[in-house]
Image (cartoon, rainbow, N blue to C red):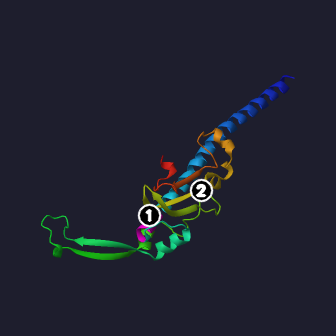
């Protein structure tokens, strides 16, 4: 009888130990996976933002599709104006100032930044899902400005952790919230992860 009770107590201790381990393991695994996946998505969004800024410097507006973004960055050129002389000099002589315009292929600059324009639309860990992209103009404080917004819902890239039940481990976690940069209602390109 004593052996049976000892075996039952031993089994109970093992069972409680496993439950305690499982309760500790899940939040740690969730936090590590969330940080890894969000970091990858934020890095991709930063590359898209850089590509959008280069696109705007070429065309004057933001791209409203990844196809047009890729096309312009592959075929467009940056214009650089070199000014010889100082127009701010008090002894200004217009004949002493020359302007030299030089064009550089945008693709070379994008490639040197480590940006692959063909893979920009795809969400890391998204199993083929793409980012949402919008661009337009907006009258802001009586001025027509260009606006852009690119983002994705967290549940698209969170895989097994795309469930609201995991918010018990992180009060700020909502799988239906968007991670994005830009805003269609204000002229900024800040990311909501930077707040």
Q: Position of residue 26 (x, y in %)?
A: 66, 41
Residue 138, x across and y down, in percent: 48, 60
Q: In which quarter of the image is residue 9?
A: top right
What residue is pinned by disc 1? 53
Task: For mark 2, give the secondary structure.
Answer: strand
**Residue 57 in magenta stretch:** yes
The residue at the point 51 percent across, 49 percent down is 193
Q: Which mark is residue 152?
A: 2
**Residue nearer the viewer, 33 or 73:** 73
Q: Give the range drawn in magenta.
A: 50-58
Rendering coords of residue 107 (x, y %): 44, 73
Question: Relative to 68, does residue 20 appear above or below in the rendering?
Answer: above
Tell me what residue is drawn at x 66 percent, y 53 percent.
Answer: 159
Q: What element carries label 1?
A: helix
Magenta span includes 103: no
Which one is nearer the viewer's eye here, 170 or 178? 178
Q: Count all numbered tags in the image, as a single digit.
A: 2
Which image quarter: residue 5?
top right
Instruction: Name the quadrant containing residue 84.
Output: bottom left
Seen in the picture, residue 180 relative to 81 is either above or below; the reply is: above
Majority secondary structure of magenta residues: helix
Sequence-first disc among 2 and 1: 1
Please identify the quadrant where the N terminus is shown: top right
Which residue, as the protein is rendered here, is positioned at the far front? 142
Which residue, as the protein is rendered here, is positioned at the far top?
2
Furthest-left residue in this view: 91
Q: In this view, does 35 lie to the left or right of 84?
A: right
Return the mark for residue 98.
Answer: none
């Amino acid at each position: 009888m004593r052996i049976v009770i000892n075996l039952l107590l031993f089994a109970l201790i093992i069972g409680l130990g496993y439950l305690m381990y499982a309760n500790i393991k899940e939040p740690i695994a969730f936090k590590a996976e969330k940080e890894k996946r969000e970091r990858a998505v934020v890095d991709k969004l930063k590359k898209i933002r850089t590509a959008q800024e280069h696109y705007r410097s070429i065309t004057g507006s933001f791209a409203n599709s990844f196809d047009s973004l890729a096309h312009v960055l592959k075929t467009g050129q940056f214009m650089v104006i070199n000014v010889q002389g100082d127009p701010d000099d008090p002894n200004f002589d217009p004949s002493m100032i020359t302007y030299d315009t030089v064009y550089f292929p945008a693709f070379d600059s994008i490639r040197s930044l480590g940006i692959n324009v063909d893979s920009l639309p795809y969400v890391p860990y998204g199993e083929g899902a793409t980012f949402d992209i919008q661009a337009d103009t907006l009258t802001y404080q009586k001025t027509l400005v260009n606006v852009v917004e690119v983002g994705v819902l967290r549940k698209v890239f969170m895989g097994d952790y795309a469930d609201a039940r995991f918010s018990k481990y992180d009060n700020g976690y909502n799988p239906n919230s968007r991670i994005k940069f830009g805003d269609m209602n204000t002229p900024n390109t800040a990311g909501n992860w930077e707040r």
